[in-house]
Amino acid sequence: MKSRPQASALTVRLYTAPVPRLTATIITRNESANIDAAIESVSWADEIVVVDADSTDDTPERARRHRARVDVRPWPGFSAQKNYAASIASNDWILSIDADERVTPELADEIRALLASEPPQRGYRVPRISWYLGQWIRATDWYPDYQLRLYDRRAGEWKERRVHESVSLKSGEPGRLARDLQHFPYRDISHHLQTIDRYTALAADQMVADGRVPSIAGVALNPPFAFLRNYVLRGGFRLGGVGFVVSVLNSYYVFLKLAKAWAAPRASRLTPP
């Protein structure tokens, strides 16, 4: 009679779910001054994908020096370019940052800890903090400025918008991370004003396309409310002069966006017969 094998000789196989791998994506155009620091901040990711929109500077070459995977293609718009970057990634979990953003070591640790097993949510919002006129802006509409940047591409994609694009999940609510994503949006006030002019044109076009043309009363009343929200309700006054400047320029952004949207239907009448 054969004896049964001893328990110690049995091989027990335990199933362990695979740890999600992460691709960091960055879209660029003429970001030579920013791309090195941006890539270095996500160097811990399993893969880095840079999609460049025909830069005329050395952005693609700089990215390749960091062993990033670089794809150069024409500019189709913010959302389309970010969706393309996610589509060519080797991994389903995506961390999307802009070239003027930096992932801090603390945020990197938080993301790695989350991805040590299968995350409970399909996407995560990250608080974003901006550096402006020599200090971090922890007030006004600029903070915490949650952005959905960490997501499973199988469960979400960038919603088509001309500006201020965002990831939309197919189902479920996103989670929230605690550590800040650093943002370096403007070199100075002149650069800020140039960006406001460009972005408000895109935002106004989006409003018109959505059928949301404001009245002149809306153009007049919304900017003062925006200033009060930024400076008083959201604590801009705590930042001294910088908080005042940010609050004024945020309300100016609202004014210019609404004024351009209000003026759009009248543009054809501006040229004399």
Image (cartoon, grey):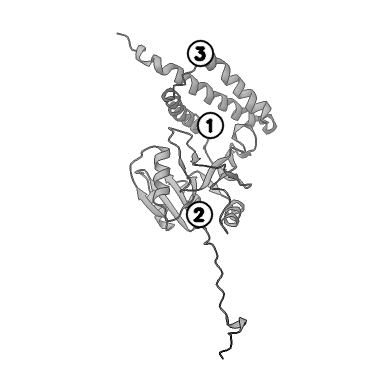
Marks 1/2: CA distance? 27 Å
Query: Dot 2: what SS?
Result: helix
Q: Earlier in the sequence, mark 2 or mark 3?
A: 2
Residue 237 locus on image (x, y percent): 68, 29
Q: What's the mark number on residue 216? A: 3
Residue 143 position in % (x across, y down):
62, 37
* Point 42% across, 39% down: residue: 79
Q: CA distance from mark 2 to mark 3?
A: 47 Å
Q: Does 246 sit left or right of 92 as displayed?
A: right
Q: Which residue is mark 1?
A: 189
SS of the residue under disc 3: helix
Circles 1 and 2 in contact, beta carbons < 8 Å: no
- Residue that carries the numbered disc 2 in the rendered image: 40
Of mark 1 and mark 3, the one earlier in the sequence is 1
Give the camera-side residue of 269 and 20.
Answer: 20
- Residue 207 showing in the rendered view: yes
